[in-house]
Image (spheres, rainbow, N blue to C red):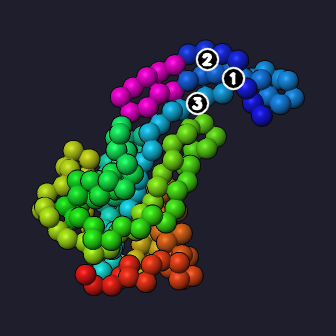
Amino acid sequence: MERKIVTLGSLHTKHFSAHLDRVRLRNGQITERIRVDHPEAVALVAFTDNNHILMVRQWRYAIARETLEIPAGKVDPGEDPRSCAQRELVEETGYSPGNLVEFLSYFPAIGYSNERIIIYAASGLRRISHSFDEKEISKVEVIPLEKVSDLITNGSIQDGKTIIAISVFQVRKRRGELPAEFFAPE
């Protein structure tokens, strides 16, 4: 186990805080660790029908390019993840889910961050708006799930949460681990 001795410096922003800590390792050695405190986030594999999902094109400043990924966003203070998933889907795509099933949560950067992403599958979508958050999203696309798998394997999709969500969803679907009514018409 590693124990913090002292925080050497911190950066606090609206969305996260980062800390440089001096720590003692289990063998007694002293070293430094970066720790990022980040709010929980959600992401959605949102089905327009049994074989097509909603995806968004979004500019990602850190890698200086547009990506194709599943809708996602940070959980606001005091907000529960399920409500956040519903809100983010509407904000990013204009669709509201009829069915929402949590099927995975994971830590995307466990070596330095406490961020946890909760992944939901959504079906029974209803279009409630023809607009989306144009500050973040450049385009909403409906893509066959089979094509999404091809885009992942050929390297066109490189977003980690999207790759993990699609891969795990397909495994859980194959195993029959989704509720029987997930793809049932409303």
Report x, y in % for residue 173.
Answer: 50, 79
For badge 1, the amino acid type reads Lys
Q: Are marks 2 and 1 in contact (CB under 8 Å)?
A: yes
Residue bearing mark 2: 7
Residue 15's place in the image compared with 169, above or below, is above
The span shown in magenta is 10-18
Instruction: Find out whether residue 11 is within the magenta segment.
Output: yes
Residue 35's place in the image compared with 59, above or below, is above
Residue closer to the observer: 94 or 123: 123
Q: Are marks 1 and 3 in contact (CB under 8 Å)?
A: no
Residue bearing mark 3: 35
Residue closer to the observer: 61 or 182: 182
Report x, y in % for residue 140.
Answer: 24, 63
Q: Are marks 3 and 2 in contact (CB under 8 Å)?
A: no
For badge 3, the amino acid type reads Arg
Label 3 vs label 2: CA separation?
A: 10 Å
Count neighbours of disc 2 (C-alpha within 10 A) and say few if under 14, some if 14 to 19, many if 20 or more: some
The residue depicted at 55 percent of the width and 76 percent of the height is 171
The residue depicted at 47 percent of the width and 69 percent of the height is 166
Residue 4 has which mark?
1
Count neighbours of disc 1 (C-alpha within 10 A) and say few if under 14, some if 14 to 19, many if 20 or more: some
The residue depicted at 35 percent of the width and 39 percent of the height is 78
